[in-house]
Each structure stands twice: as structure tokens, then as C-alpha cells.
């Protein structure tokens, strides 16, 4: 039974502090949900735990079963049992879904060993069926040309195959229609066990109709400001977040985030720009 | 026809262990070494195909040569030089309505100081060929290679190429296609060698509804300099041309892509598209892409773009978040890049060689 412990976590991006002291403990068998309006630092928390290179941790610690997570690289965190279902997964042309997962599963084994192809195909096909995805999925390129819903289901599929001990699902419900949400909900619920600690990040209540949460947290201004059980979610559902803001004397719940770095546009000039000429 | 082609003196053919290794498992292949067909191993699927060296072809297929000399020649001096002065030449001829689905692998090997080769591929109307060439050199010096493909009406040519020339070679490769009405040409060219390289591919869309696709994949490493040009010229209405360039520049190498989609006046409803993808691996490496559109007609569709930079950090992060080491993730992304040519390599021996070379060049 794994335990992920986050203590007084501070993190910044490009010199701007986004997380301002997050405390959270997730144990195997528990399901936590973090709610809160947009721009309060929820997704940042998920990215920091996974080790996104954009963020710098300035204070605090994260441990997984006592091991210091902050000292691990992204891939080491994954192999230690962490999983992050991403809000907007990358598209990787030329890499097929099955090749990718196979490589990821082999990375968990001792060097030189690899999983049996037969077993892998059987397991993969079953997961594809469970998530009601197209049969051609293994041969399609990773997330390329996928609809929003397909991408999210593909994240859950990867989680099924990799069997993490702590899984964070970052807005897995956004962009999903009701049917897809039901499929995702059922599959995640089916995976619940004493060996899996779950953290759901969402700003819609409807995800929690399909996946039962034991603990509900509200995040504002880069901190967890309120925790409770499912009744907290029900109260938010009816009354919104304003009462919490009033109770805590918060005017604006957001932490300021600058717009992302400008993307290099297409064209010859961009080539030079990209090469910094 | 004024052709200077001379039969090679009957030298004893040097056995090349590397080629022997690469051709194991291949069912159908031809080995052309310094102008002679050394091995020709073709199953009955290829019975209708004519493959001759120029000296043989001049004897047995004089009529074909007359026909070729009347066919439209590209406007290039290099082309003519290579046709008249070559010391190695191959004619590949497919009669009308002949469809060969199995790929034909041809290895062009030079062991001499100078290699000047010319290949003519002639597909009569409604025929179909899947051709794959391998360029190798055991020698030091120049490797000049020109191929001209004539794709007849409603004919279909898939043209794969893999060049793996050593760093002691300066190489010039020029591939032309002329595509007639409803014809289709599909070029997928990969360069994984270390030679100083100029590679050019021109597709002339000469008949209405003709279409041409040209994908080039190149990896440069070390002090290598290489330039890859692709030109699709629309000489008829309703033609479609697609250019794709994929490149990886490592170490202090320089890689240049130049793509030109040219739609001439009056060639209405034509489509010209082009995209360039590049990964700059080396700190001192340089990768340029010049995507050009030369359009002299209003009623057309055209687009061009280039995306060049370091390996996408988000992609890397995504793959690593599933447990892949940085190295493995990078490898997967680069190999993914190369999949258009990878998918054409049939045997494990060829695939392994390709991946090994890619790994060596991208370390």
C-alpha cells in the first residue's frame, strides 16, 4: 500500500510562485478529489508531482513511501509507481500506441527482459474493448488526430496497462461527452483497490457521480483551503465557491499565471528564430 | 542515339560481405556493381519486367531506347551528362497493364573511384511498380546517380530509396519523374549515410489529374553537409503535388531542405502542399528549410510550412512520464519521425541496419 505525502509544497514557473504551501497525503485505497475554479494551481500541483521541467520546486517535499520524489527524474517517478493522466496529452507522430506502451512496460522490467508479446496483445485488446475504443488503436500514432475524448480514454488505457500505485487524473472529465464520461468512470472505478491511491482533479462535479471520492479538497490561491468528505462537494454543487471565499476572506481565488511562452510560428523566419540567429 | 556507354572490362567482381548480409531474406533483388548486374534473383512475379544494363538494352531493346530519346527530358545539364557519360546504366521497363505488387529491391554499389550511374524506369499505361533502391559505395570518390521515371497514363510508381554512402564519398543524386494523366508517383527517400550530399528530386506532373508525393528523410551528423531539394512542377490542370521533408541534424552538421511547389499558368484546380519537420540535436548543428511556392494561377490550393527546433519538450516529458528514460523517449521520437521509410523496409535485416545507423548518427 503506497503513500504519497506532499508537505508544504511551494513551486514556481518563470519566477512566479504558483503553489504556496500544499499539504496532502494520499494512501493506497483512498480516492481524493481536488476541486476549485480555474487558475488556482490544481493542474500545476499535478505537473509538479510528476516533475514537469517547466516548474521549479522552491520549498517543501514530496515523498512516495518515504522516498524523496523531488530527487527523481520524470521517468524514475513513473517507474516508482506514479501516474499522471494528463489534461492535454502530446501527439507523437510515427510512434504507435502499442509500441509506446510496450516500451513503457518493458522499461519497468529488469534490463534485457521483456514482456511476452502474446500476453501484451491480449491485455491490450481487452483494455481497448473495456474503453470502447476503435480496434485499430494499437496501430494508430500516439494521440495523433485523436478527438479530445479519445485522448482522455487513451490516458486511462495507459493507466490500465501500467498499473500505478498512485494515479493523478488531471481534468480527465473535461471534453468528454456523457457516454465517454461514463466509460471512463466505470473503468477507473473498476481499477480501485487497496493498491491504488487516486487523486482526481476537476472543476466539474459530474465526474464524482461516476467515481466515488473519499476526500474532497478545495484549492484556491495555490493552497488547499478546505477539506472534507463528499458532503463538501454537494455543498459546492449547490452553492458554488463564493461561500468558501467569504468564509476565508479571499477576493480573487486565482494565482497569477502569465501566458505561456510564445510559440514559434511556421516559416523561414521561424527557422531562424528557433535557431536563435 | 549518342550514348557513350561502355561495357565494363571483365574485372573479377569483388565480393561485398555487407551487401550479402543485407540481401539475406530478400526474395527479389538485383545487385548492380560498377555497371554490371552481378546478382539477379527474381521470382515469377517479375516475369513481365525487363531489367537490362544499357549495353544489353542497346542490343535487345533498341526500339525502347529510341522511344526514350523522344521522351521529354528534364531541363538539366547534369541529366544529359549523366545519360551520355555514365559508366553504369540500368533500364527497367514494365509493359502496358502489368501490375507487380511485390517490391523490387536494387542495390547500386560502387567500388571504384568514380561512379556515374543512370537508371531509366519506364512504366507503360496502367502498369504498377514498387521499386526500392539502395545506394552503397565501397570506394572513395564521387558517386553520381541519376534516375528518370516515366509514369504512363493511370500508372502507379512507388519509389523507395535508401542511401548509405560513406564519408569518403561526395555524392550527387538526381531523381526525376514525369507523370502522365491519372498517373501517380510516390517517392520516399531516406539518407542515412555520411557523404557530402546533394540530392534532388523533381516530379513533373504532365497530365491532368496526375499526382506526385515526395517524402525525404535525412539525418546528418559529424561535419557532414547535405542539401535536399524537391521540386514538384504542375504542367497540367487538376494535378496534386505533396512534398514532405523530415530531418535530424546532429553534431556540427548542416542540413538544408529546399522544397518548391510550382504551379504554372492555367493549371487550374491544382493542389500544392508542403511541410518540413526538423529536429536540431547538435549544439552547433544547423538545419534550414526553405518552403517555396511559385504560383502563377489563381484557382489553386496551396500551403507550405516548416516546424524546426529541438526535440519537443512536452513530447519528451509525456513519454518519460510513462517510465521511458530520456534516451529511450528521444529514440522513439526520432524513429517515429522516420516511419515513412521504415515501413517500406521489408526484412528484419534491413530494419535493424536502418535503426542501427540512425542510432549511430543521433547519439
Image (spheres, rainbow, N blue to C red):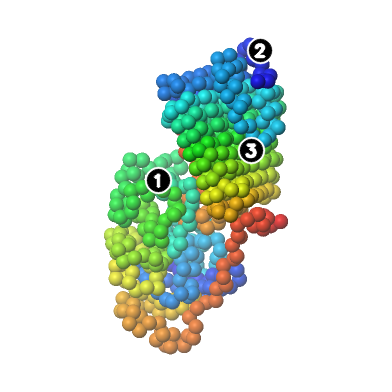
Q: Is residue B191 visible?
A: yes
Label 1 or label 3, whichever lies nearer to me, is: 3
The chain letter under disc 2 is B
User: Farthest residue in the front direction?
Assistant: B266
Disc 1 + disc 2, Cβ < 8 Å: no
Disc 1 + disc 3, Cβ < 8 Å: no
Q: Earlier in the sequence, mark 2 or mark 3?
A: 2
Say which mark, if any, is on residue B200: 3
What residue do we see at 51% from left, 55% from top? B315
Q: Where's residue B58, x and y in %?
A: 60, 17
Residue B90 to residue A59: above or below: above
Give the residue pinned by disc 2.
Answer: B9
Q: Quadrant of the N terminus of chain B?
A: top right
Residue A8 or residue A49, whichever sits in front: A49
Q: Is residue B171 visible?
A: no
The chain letter under disc 1 is A
Left or right relative to A250: residue B4: right
Q: CA distance from mark 1 to mark 3?
A: 32 Å
Same chain for the residues at labels 1 and 2, yes or no?
A: no
What residue do we see at 34% from left, 51% from top? A134
What residue do we see at 56% from left, 21% from top? B64
Residue B83 to residue B203: above or below: above
Say which mark, if any, is on residue B275: none
Q: CA distance from mark 1 to mark 2?
A: 51 Å
Residue B226 to residue A133: above or below: above
Residue B242 or residue A264, whichever sits in front: B242
What residue do we see at 66% from left, 44% from top? B255
Give the residue pinned by disc 1.
Answer: A139
Residue A137 or residue B85, whichever sits in front: B85
Q: Where's residue B34, x and y in %?
A: 63, 20
Label 1 or label 2, whichever lies nearer to me, is: 2
Label 2 or label 3, whichever lies nearer to me, is: 3
Amino acid at each position: 500500500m503506497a503513500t504519497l505525502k506532499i508537505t508544504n509544497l511551494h513551486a514556481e514557473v518563470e519566477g512566479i510562485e504558483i503553489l504556496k504551501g500544499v499539504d496532502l497525503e494520499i494512501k493506497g485505497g483512498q480516492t481524493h478529489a481536488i476541486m476549485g475554479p480555474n487558475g488556482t494551481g490544481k493542474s500545476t500541483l499535478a505537473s509538479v508531482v510528476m516533475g514537469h521541467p517547466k516548474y521549479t520546486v522552491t520549498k517543501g517535499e514530496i515523498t512516495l513511501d518515504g522516498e524523496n520524489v523531488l530527487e527523481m527524474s520524470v521517468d524514475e517517478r513513473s517507474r516508482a509507481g506514479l501516474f499522471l493522466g494528463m489534461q492535454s496529452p502530446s501527439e507523437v507522430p510515427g510512434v504507435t500506441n502499442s509500441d509506446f506502451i510496450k516500451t513503457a512496460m518493458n522499461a519497468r522490467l529488469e534490463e534485457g527482459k521483456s514482456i511476452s508479446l502474446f500476453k501484451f496483445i491480449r491485455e491490450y485488446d481487452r483494455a481497448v474493448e473495456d474503453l470502447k475504443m476503435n480496434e485499430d488503436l494499437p496501430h494508430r500514432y500516439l494521440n495523433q488526430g485523436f478527438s479530445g475524448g479519445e485522448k482522455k480514454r487513451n490516458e486511462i488505457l495507459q493507466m490500465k496497462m501500467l498499473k500505478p500505485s498512485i494515479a493523478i487524473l488531471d481534468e480527465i472529465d473535461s471534453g468528454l461527452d456523457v457516454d465517454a464520461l461514463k466509460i471512463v468512470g466505470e473503468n477507473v472505478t473498476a481499477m480501485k483497490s487497496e493498491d491504488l491511491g487516486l487523486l482526481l482533479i476537476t472543476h466539474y462535479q459530474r465526474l464524482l457521480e461516476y467515481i466515488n471520492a473519499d476526500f474532497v479538497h478545495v484549492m484556491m490561491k495555490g493552497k488547499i483551503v478546505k477539506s472534507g468528505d463528499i458532503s463538501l462537494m454537494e455543498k459546492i454543487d449547490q452553492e458554488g465557491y463564493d461561500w468558501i471565499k467569504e468564509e476565508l476572506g479571499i477576493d480573487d481565488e486565482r494565482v497569477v499565471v502569465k501566458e505561456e511562452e510564445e510559440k514559434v510560428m511556421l516559416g523561414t523566419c521561424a527557422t531562424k528564430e528557433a535557431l536563435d540567429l | 542515339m549518342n550514348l557513350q556507354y561502355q561495357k565494363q572490362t571483365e574485372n573479377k567482381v569483388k565480393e561485398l560481405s555487407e551487401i550479402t548480409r543485407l540481401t539475406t531474406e530478400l526474395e527479389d533483388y538485383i545487385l548492380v556493381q560498377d555497371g554490371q548486374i552481378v546478382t539477379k534473383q527474381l521470382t515469377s512475379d517479375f516475369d513481365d519486367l525487363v531489367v537490362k544494363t544499357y549495353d544489353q538494352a542497346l542490343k535487345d531493346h533498341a526500339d525502347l531506347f529510341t522511344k526514350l530519346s523522344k521522351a521529354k527530358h528534364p531541363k538539366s545539364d547534369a541529366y544529359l551528362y549523366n545519360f551520355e557519360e555514365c559508366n553504369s546504366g540500368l533500364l527497367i521497363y514494365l509493359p502496358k497493364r502489368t501490375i507487380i505488387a511485390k517490391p523490387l529491391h536494387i542495390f547500386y554499389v560502387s567500388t571504384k573511384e568514380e561512379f556515374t550511374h543512370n537508371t531509366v524506369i519506364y512504366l507503360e499505361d496502367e502498369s504498377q511498380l514498387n521499386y526500392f533502391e539502395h545506394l552503397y559505395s565501397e570506394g572513395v570518390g564521387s558517386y553520381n546517380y541519376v534516375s528518370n521515371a516515366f509514369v504512363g497514363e493511370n500508372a502507379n510508381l512507388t519509389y523507395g530509396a535508401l542511401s548509405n554512402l560513406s564519408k569518403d564519398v561526395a555524392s550527387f543524386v538526381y531523381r526525376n519523374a514525369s507523370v502522365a494523366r491519372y498517373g501517380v508517383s510516390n517517392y520516399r527517400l531516406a539518407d542515412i549515410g555520411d557523404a557530402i550530399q546533394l540530392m534532388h528530386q523533381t516530379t513533373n506532373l504532365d497530365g491532368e489529374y496526375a499526382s506526385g508525393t515526395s517524402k525525404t528523410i535525412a539525418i546528418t551528423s559529424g561535419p557532414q553537409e547535405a542539401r535536399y531539394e524537391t521540386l514538384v512542377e504542375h504542367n497540367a490542370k487538376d494535378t496534386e503535388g505533396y512534398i514532405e521533408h523530415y530531418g535530424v541534424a546532429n553534431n556540427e552538421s548542416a542540413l538544408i531542405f529546399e522544397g518548391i511547389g510550382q504551379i504554372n499558368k492555367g493549371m487550374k484546380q491544382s493542389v500544392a502542399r508542403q511541410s518540413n519537420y526538423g529536429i536540431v540535436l547538435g549544439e552547433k548543428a544547423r538545419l534550414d528549410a526553405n518552403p517555396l511556392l511559385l504560383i502563377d494561377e489563381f484557382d489553386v490550393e496551396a500551403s507550405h510550412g516548416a516546424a524546426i527546433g529541438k526535440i519537443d519538450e512536452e513530447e519528451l516529458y509525456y513519454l518519460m512520464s510513462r517510465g521511458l528514460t530520456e534516451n529511450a523517449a528521444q529514440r522513439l521520437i526520432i524513429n517515429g519521425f522516420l516511419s515513412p521509410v521504415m515501413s517500406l523496409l521489408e526484412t528484419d535485416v534491413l530494419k535493424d541496419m536502418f535503426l542501427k545507423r540512425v542510432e549511430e548518427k543521433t547519439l
